[in-house]
Image (cartoon, rainbow, N blue to C red):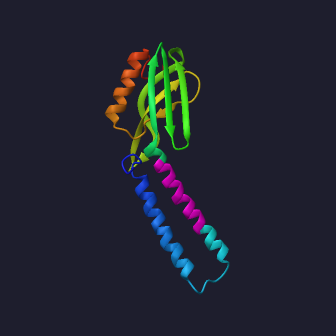
């Protein structure tokens, strides 16, 4: 869980612990001025953020994917806690396959993912945060098997 979520799970736990301490302090305060609903609504937002981080971390850690290349077609199936997704591309519909930045950063370092770039449509990324050499190897093997380039022309 800790490694698969890239630190998000630990940060989510820390966040929730801090919010719990603040919630207990507010609940035990005897002299509350003003409208207590506003304070509890704000604490609720912080709880929502913390629980969302934990849910996202669990999904990142538990997500699994399968790649299959056969008859000039790439099939990808991904299973996570929010359900399963499936993608199918013909060789002719793939503009490029490469390991590239996902748009996320951890400690000012870009997170690399395996990207499938269709001829028409948005790129689709898989295995974000895995070892860069492993992702480059997967991209290379998929390009070789499908005979597609690393970059678009």
Residue drawn at point x = 53 percent, y = 58 percent: 51
Answer above or below: position of 100 versus 1.
Answer: above
Measured as percent of width and height from the top left, residue 11 is found at 42, 58
Q: Is residue 74 left or right of residue 43?
A: left
Answer above or below: position of 129 versus 114.
Answer: below
Q: How many marks?
A: 0
Answer above or below: position of 20 versus 31.
Answer: above
Measured as percent of width and height from the top left, residue 71 is found at 47, 12
Which span is picked out in magenta? 43-58
Residue drawn at point x = 41 percent, y = 21 percent: 142
- The image quarter containing residue 42 is bottom right
Measured as percent of width and height from the top left, residue 136 is found at 35, 29
Answer above or below: position of 2 versus 113.
Answer: below
Residue drawn at point x = 45 percent, y = 33 percent: 65
Extreme residue in the bottom direction: 31
Extreme residue in the left direction: 133
Chief secondary structure of the magenta portion: helix
Is 104 covered by the magenta stretch? no
**In front here: 106 or 128?**
128
Measured as percent of width and height from the top left, residue 57 is found at 46, 50
Residue drawn at point x = 59 percent, y = 27 percent: 121
């Amino acid at each position: 869980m800790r490694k698969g979520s890239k630190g998000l799970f630990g940060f989510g736990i820390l966040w929730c612990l801090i919010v719990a301490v603040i919630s207990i302090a507010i609940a035990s305060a005897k002299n509350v001025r003003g409208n207590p609903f506003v304070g509890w609504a704000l604490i609720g937002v912080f709880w929502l953020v913390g629980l969302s981080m934990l849910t996202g971390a669990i999904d990142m850690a538990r997500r699994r994917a399968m790649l299959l290349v056969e008859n000039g077609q790439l099939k990808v199936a991904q299973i996570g806690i929010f359900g399963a997704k499936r993608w199918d591309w013909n060789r002719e519909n793939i503009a490029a396959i490469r390991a590239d930045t996902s748009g996320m950063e951890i400690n000012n370092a870009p997170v690399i993912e395996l990207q499938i770039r269709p001829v028409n449509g948005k790129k689709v990324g898989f295995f974000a945060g895995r070892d860069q050499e492993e992702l480059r190897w997967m991209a290379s093997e998929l390009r070789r098997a499908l005979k597609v380039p690393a970059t678009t022309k």
